[in-house]
C-alpha cells in the first residue's frame, strides 16, 4: 500500500503540489490524470525519489520512504521517452539492473529470457540496437527493463503518448492484461481521460497542483465532484441562464441560473415521445452534426444556447441541419457546484 | 530530522573535492591574474596611478600601433565581408559550375590558417618569393614591394578570415526557406531584387555577428603584422609583445592589453545584445530546401565565374605551393626553382633523421594533447554541475569559465606573466614564469570556452530520464554516469578533445609570449623559418611542418564535422 500523507512539493517558491493525501491499494492500477502542468508527473517522481517532498510523508507498506534514495526504493519506472540506453542493445538494456546487482551471467540470461517472453518481445530482437525497434517494441523493452527487477511498484509515465492511435489502443489492452497477470501495484500517469477510464481501477484527477477527486472510473465520470472534473472528463454540456430557466420551469428540482449546470451529452435524448415522467422537454434545431460511423454528434440551438447530443447509428439517415428536434432531459442528470 | 537525513543522503566527498578543485582553478587562473594585471597597471606604491596612460600616450610607436590596428580592423570589415559574401553566394546561392571544387578551395582556410597560412603567403608573394621569381621572366618590372606593410597584412588577413563566412553564412543561406524566394519571383521580383530584399535581410543578423568577429580578429592580429607588416605597419599585439620583453615597458604592454581586452569586451557585449534580438527564424511549417539560382544575364554569369575561379586560385595557390615545395630539396626552396631534378623526399627524411627536427612536433603534440585532455575533464565536471547541480553555482561556474572568451590571447598571456613571476600562495608559491607549465596553463585557459560550450550542449541534449532510469534500477550516481551518460557523451568528448588539440597544435599568438626556450612549439619554429635570415634547412622543415599540420587539421575537422554530416544523413 502506498500512502501520500499531507504531501506538499515545492520548487523554490513555486508550489508544484499543494497539500494532499491519497492512498493507493496493493495490486491496484491507479491513474494520475490531469492536464499538463497539473503536478501528476511531479507526484510520480516524488514516489520514485527523483523529487524531494517539502513536507508530509510518502509511505510504502507503512514505512516512510522520503529519505530513501531512488536506487533503494525498488520502484520500476517506464518513462515517457522510454529512456532506453542508446549505447546498449536490447539485451543489455533489459539486463542493466541485474548487472548493477552483480548477478551471475547465466542467471541474468535466464531472467532476461523469461521477462522477454512475458512482454511478448521476440528473442530475435534481443541483440538489436534499440534504435532499430518500432515504437511498440521499444515500449515492451522499457516495461521488461522495469519489471525484471521484480519491483514492488511499477510507475508508468505517459507510456503510450509516443505511439500512433491504433497501436496505442492495442498496447493499452495488453498493458492492462500484463498488469492483471503480474498483480503489481501500478501508478499510471496520463492526460488522456479515455486511457484513464479504460485502464484504471481508480483514478486521481489533478488540476493546477491540487487533488480534485479520487474514485473509480464510474465515480469520476458519473459523480464528478467539481466543475473542473466535469469539464475535463468526457464531453459535457454547460447550461446557463435561459436553458436553466426553462428546466426550472418544468421540474421540481431547481437550479441556480447564475451558475453553470453540467449535463453529459449522451444524457440528452431525442424523439417524439417523452421517455419518462421525470424528463423535461426543450425545443431545439440542428445547427451542425459530426458523423463518425458509430455515433452522430449533434449541435442543437436551444433558445440561443448551443447544446450537444449523441445518437447511436442504427442504420437510419442522420438528421439534417435545420431539422426541428425535441430534446428530453432528466434533471437528476444535471450537476451544479 | 528530515533535512539532516537528506543532507547526508546528498553529501558526497568526491563532489566536494571537485567543487574545491574548480573553485581553486577559477580563482588561480581566471580571476586572480586579471585582477593582479589591473593592480600592476593602475596601482603604484599603494596609490591609484594613471601614470602608465601618460607613458602610453607619449609613446609614438604605441599610438601608431593602435591607429594601425583599428585601420586594419575597419578595412577588414569591408574586404572580408566582400570576399566572404561573394564566395558564399557563388558556392551556395548562385548556380556556378564547379561549385563543389570552389567550396573546397574556399574552405581551405579551415585547415590552412594562422602562422602556417602567413608563412605560405609570404613564400608566394614576398620580394624573394615564388611569384617574383616566376614573373621575373614575363614581367621584369613586377615589384613585390606591395607585399609589405598595410597592403600585405590586409591581403593576408582578408583571405585568412573568411572562415566565419564559410561556416555561419553558408549555414544561414541553407536555412532560408526557398518558398519565400519562389513567392517573391511569383510576384514578379527580379533576381537582384530577390537577393537584395528577401535573401540578404534574412542574413542580416549573421552578417552582424561575422562582422564583429572579423573586426575583433583584425584588432588582435599578430602573426601577419609580425611577418609581413614590416617596421611601417605594426599593430597592437606585436607591439605588446615587444614591450613585454623589457621590464621598463612591461606596464605599457599590460595597459595596451587591457585596452584591447576592453574593446573586445564592448564589441562582444554589443554582439550578444543583437543576437538576443533574435535571428529570423523561418515560420514555414514545411520549409523547402533552397535551390541554386541560375544567373539570367550572360555577361554577369561569365564575370561571376571568372571572379570565382580567380579567388579560388588566390586561396589555393599558397597551400599547393607549400605542399609541392615540401617534396623538393633545400636548393629548390632557396632558389624557388621547381625543376624536376630538385624533387625529392629529402625533407621528409630529414624530419626523421636530423636530430631535433621532430622536437617541435613532440613539444606541440604533448602540450596540445595534455591541454585538450585536461580542459575536457575540467569542462566535463563543470558541465555536469551546470546541468544537474545547484543552479546558482552552475551559473557562476559557467560565467567564470567563459571569461577567456572575452579576453584576447595577449591579455591572458600578460596577466599570467605579471602574476606568476613571483611566488604566490595560491600557486603553492611556485613561480610559473620560466616554467614549461606556464604555456600549458595558458593553452588550457584559452580552450575553456569552446570546450565548455560544446560539452554543456551535449549534456543538455541528453534525455534526463536516462540517468533517472538507471538510478531506478539500482545504479548509484557514479555508476549511472559511467555506464549510461559517459558512453553517450563519448563521441562528443572525443570530438572536443580532437578539435581542441587541433586548434592548439599550430598556436602562435599565445605561445610567442609564453614558450619555454627549451621547448619551442611548432608555431614559433614556423615563424622563425619565415625570417630572411633563416637557413635552408629550417625553411625546408617549415614546409613539412605545414603540410603535416594541414593533414592533422583535415583529419580533425573531418572527424568532427564529417561525423555530424554522416549522422544527419542517417537520420534522413
Image (cartoon, rainbow, N blue to C red):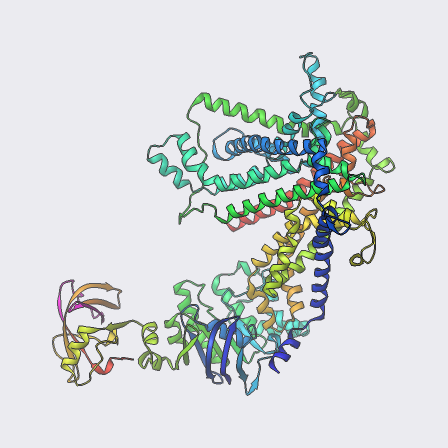
**Is residue B473 depicted above or below B277 in this figure?**
below
Is residue B390 shown left or right of residue A335? Answer: right
Residue B104, position as x, y percentages in the image: 59, 34
Residue A46, position as x, y percentages in the image: 53, 75
Q: What is the quadrant of the C terminus of chain A in the image?
A: bottom left
Is residue B245 shown left or right of residue A223? Answer: right
Is residue A120 shown left or right of residue B24? Answer: left
Identity of the residue furthest to the front in this view: B47
Judge by depth and name the residue closer to the eye, B245 or A156: B245
Judge by depth and name the residue closer to the eye, A151 or B280: B280
Reply yes or no: does residue A241 show up in magenta.
Answer: no
Residue B570, position as x, y percentages in the image: 54, 49
> Based on the displayed image, in which of its 4 quarters is residue A293 positioned?
bottom left
- State the residue at coordinates (50%, 35%): B92
Judge by depth and name the residue closer to the eye, B108 or B506: B506
**Is residue A320 depicted above or below A334 in this figure?**
above
> Based on the displayed image, in which of its 4 quarters is residue B352 positioned?
top right
Identity of the residue furthest to the right in this view: B355
Regarding residue A87, the answer to whether it shows in the image is no
**Is residue A280 depicted above or below A191 in this figure?**
below
**Is residue A267 depicted above or below B244 in this figure?**
below
* Residues drawn in magenta: A301-325
- State the residue at coordinates (79%, 56%): B427
Number of dots carrying numbers: 0
Judge by depth and name the residue closer to the eye, B120 or B265: B265
Is residue B502 shown left or right of residue B286? Answer: right
Regarding residue B311, the answer to whether it shows in the image is yes
Residue B437, position as x, y percentages in the image: 80, 50
Amino acid at each position: 500500500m502506498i500512502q501520500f500523507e499531507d504531501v506538499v512539493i515545492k520548487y523554490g517558491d513555486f508550489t508544484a503540489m499543494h497539500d494532499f493525501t491519497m492512498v493507493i491499494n496493493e495490486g491496484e492500477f491507479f491513474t494520475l490524470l490531469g492536464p499538463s502542468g497539473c503536478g501528476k508527473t511531479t507526484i510520480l517522481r516524488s514516489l520514485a525519489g527523483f523529487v524531494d517532498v517539502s513536507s508530509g510523508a510518502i509511505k510504502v507498506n507503512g514505512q516512510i520512504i522520503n529519505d530513501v534514495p531512488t536506487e533503494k526504493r525498488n520502484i520500476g519506472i517506464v518513462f515517457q521517452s522510454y529512456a532506453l540506453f542508446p549505447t546498449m542493445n536490447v539485451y543489455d538494456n533489459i539486463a542493466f539492473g541485474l548487472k548493477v546487482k552483480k548477478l551471475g551471467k547465466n542467471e541474468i540470461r535466464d531472467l532476461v529470457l523469461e521477462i522477454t517472453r512475458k512482454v511478448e518481445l521476440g528473442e530475435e530482437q534481443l541483440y538489436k540496437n534499440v534504435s532499430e525497434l518500432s515504437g511498440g517494441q521499444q515500449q515492451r523493452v522499457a516495461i521488461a527493463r522495469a519489471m525484471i527487477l521484480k519491483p514492488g511498484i511499477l510507475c508508468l509515465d505517459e507510456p503510450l503518448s509516443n505511439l500512433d492511435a491504433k497501436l496505442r489502443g492495442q498496447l493499452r489492452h495488453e498493458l492492462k492484461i500484463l498488469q492483471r497477470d503480474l498483480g503489481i501495484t501500478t501508478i499510471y500517469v496520463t492526460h488522456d481521460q479515455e486511457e484513464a477510464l479504460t485502464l484504471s481501477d481508480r483514478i486521481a484527477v489533478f488540476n493546477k497542483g491540487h487533488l480534485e477527486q479520487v474514485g473509480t472510473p464510474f465515480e469520476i465520470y458519473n459523480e464528478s465532484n467539481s466543475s473542473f472534473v466535469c469539464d475535463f472528463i468526457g464531453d459535457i454540456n454547460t447550461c446557463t441562464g435561459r436553458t436553466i430557466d426553462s428546466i426550472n420551469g418544468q421540474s421540481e428540482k431547481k437550479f441556480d441560473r447564475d451558475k453553470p449546470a453540467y449535463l453529459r451529452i449522451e444524457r440528452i435524448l431525442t424523439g417524439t415521445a417523452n421517455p419518462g415522467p421525470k424528463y423535461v422537454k426543450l425545443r431545439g434545431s440542428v445547427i451542425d452534426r459530426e458523423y463518425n460511423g458509430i455515433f452522430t454528434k449533434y449541435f442543437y440551438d436551444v433558445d440561443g444556447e448551443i447544446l450537444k447530443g449523441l445518437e447511436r447509428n442504427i442504420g437510419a439517415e442522420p438528421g439534417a441541419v435545420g431539422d426541428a428536434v425535441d430534446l428530453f432531459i432528466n434533471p437528476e442528470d444535471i450537476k451544479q457546484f | 530530522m528530515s533535512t539532516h537525513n537528506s543532507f547526508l543522503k546528498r553529501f558526497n566527498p568526491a563532489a566536494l573535492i571537485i567543487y574545491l578543485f574548480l573553485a581553486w582553478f577559477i580563482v588561480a587562473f581566471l580571476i586572480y591574474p586579471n585582477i593582479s594585471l589591473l593592480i600592476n597597471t593602475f596601482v603604484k606604491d599603494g596609490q591609484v596611478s594613471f601614470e602608465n596612460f601618460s607613458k602610453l600616450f607619449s609613446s609614438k610607436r604605441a599610438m601608431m600601433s593602435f591607429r594601425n590596428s583599428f585601420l586594419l580592423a575597419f578595412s577588414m570589415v569591408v574586404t572580408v565581408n566582400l570576399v566572404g559574401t561573394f564566395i558564399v553566394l557563388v558556392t551556395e546561392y548562385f548556380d556556378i559550375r564547379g561549385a563543389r571544387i570552389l567550396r573546397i578551395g574556399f574552405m581551405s582556410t579551415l585547415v590552412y590558417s594562422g602562422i602556417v597560412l602567413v608563412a605560405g603567403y609570404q613564400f608566394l608573394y614576398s620580394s624573394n618569393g615564388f611569384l617574383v621569381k616566376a614573373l621575373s621572366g614575363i614581367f621584369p618590372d613586377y615589384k613585390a614591394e606591395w607585399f609589405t606593410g598595410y597592403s600585405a597584412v590586409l591581403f593576408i588577413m582578408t583571405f585568412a578570415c573568411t572562415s566565419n563566412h564559410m561556416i555561419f553564412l553558408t549555414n544561414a543561406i541553407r536555412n532560408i526557406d526557398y518558398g519565400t524566394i519562389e513567392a517573391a519571383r511569383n510576384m514578379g521580383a527580379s533576381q537582384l531584387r530577390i537577393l537584395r530584399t528577401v535573401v540578404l535581410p534574412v542574413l542580416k543578423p549573421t552578417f552582424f555577428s561575422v562582422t564583429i568577429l572579423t573586426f575583433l580578429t583584425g584588432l588582435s592580429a599578430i602573426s601577419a603584422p609580425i611577418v609581413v607588416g614590416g617596421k611601417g605597419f605594426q599593430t597592437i599585439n606585436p607591439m605588446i609583445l615587444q614591450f613585454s620583453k623589457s621590464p621598463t615597458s612591461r606596464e605599457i604592454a599590460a595597459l595596451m592589453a587591457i585596452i584591447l581586452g576592453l574593446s573586445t569586451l564592448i564589441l562582444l557585449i554589443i554582439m550578444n545584445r543583437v543576437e538576443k534580438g533574435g535571428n529570423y527564424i523561418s515560420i514555414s511549417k514545411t520549409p523547402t530546401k533552397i535551390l541554386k539560382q541560375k544567373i539570367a544575364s550572360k555577361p554577369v554569369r561569365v564575370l561571376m565565374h571568372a571572379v570565382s575561379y580567380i579567388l579560388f586560385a588566390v586561396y589555393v595557390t599558397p597551400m599547393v605551393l607549400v605542399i609541392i615545395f615540401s617534396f623538393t630539396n633545400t636548393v629548390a626552396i632557396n632558389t624557388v626553382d621547381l625543376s624536376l631534378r630538385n624533387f625529392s623526399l629529402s625533407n621528409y627524411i630529414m624530419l626523421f633523421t636530423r636530430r631535433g627536427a621532430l622536437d617541435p612536433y613532440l613539444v606541440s603534440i604533448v602540450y596540445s594533447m595534455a591541454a585538450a585532455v585536461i580542459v575536457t575533464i575540467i569542462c566535463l565536471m563543470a558541465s555536469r554541475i551546470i546541468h544537474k547541480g545547484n543552479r546558482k553555482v552552475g551559473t557562476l561556474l559557467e560565467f567564470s569559465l567563459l571569461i577567456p572568451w572575452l579576453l584576447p590571447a595577449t591579455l591572458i598571456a600578460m596577466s599570467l606573466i605579471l602574476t606568476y613571476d613571483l611566488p604566490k600562495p595560491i600557486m603553492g608559491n611556485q613561480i610559473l614564469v620560466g616554467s614549461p607549465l606556464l604555456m600549458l596553463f595558458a593553452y588550457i585557459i584559452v580552450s575553456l570556452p569552446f570546450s565548455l560550450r560544446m560539452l554543456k550542449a551535449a549534456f543538455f541534449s541528453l534525455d534526463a530520464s536516462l540517468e533517472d532510469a538507471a538510478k531506478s534500477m539500482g545504479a548509484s550516481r557514479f555508476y549511472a554516469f559511467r555506464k549510461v551518460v559517459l558512453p553517450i557523451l563519448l563521441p562528443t568528448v572525443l570530438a572536443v578533445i580532437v578539435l581542441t588539440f587541433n586548434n592548439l597544435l599550430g598556436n602562435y599568438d599565445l605561445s610567442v609570449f609564453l614558450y619555454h626556450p627549451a621547448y619551442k612549439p611548432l608555431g614559433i619554429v614556423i615563424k622563425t623559418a619565415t625570417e630572411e635570415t633563416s637557413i635552408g634547412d629550417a625553411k625546408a622543415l617549415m614546409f613539412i611542418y605545414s603540410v603535416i599540420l594541414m593533414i592533422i587539421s583535415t583529419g580533425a575537422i573531418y572527424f568532427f564535422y564529417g561525423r555530424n554530416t554522416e549522422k544527419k544523413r542517417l537520420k534522413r
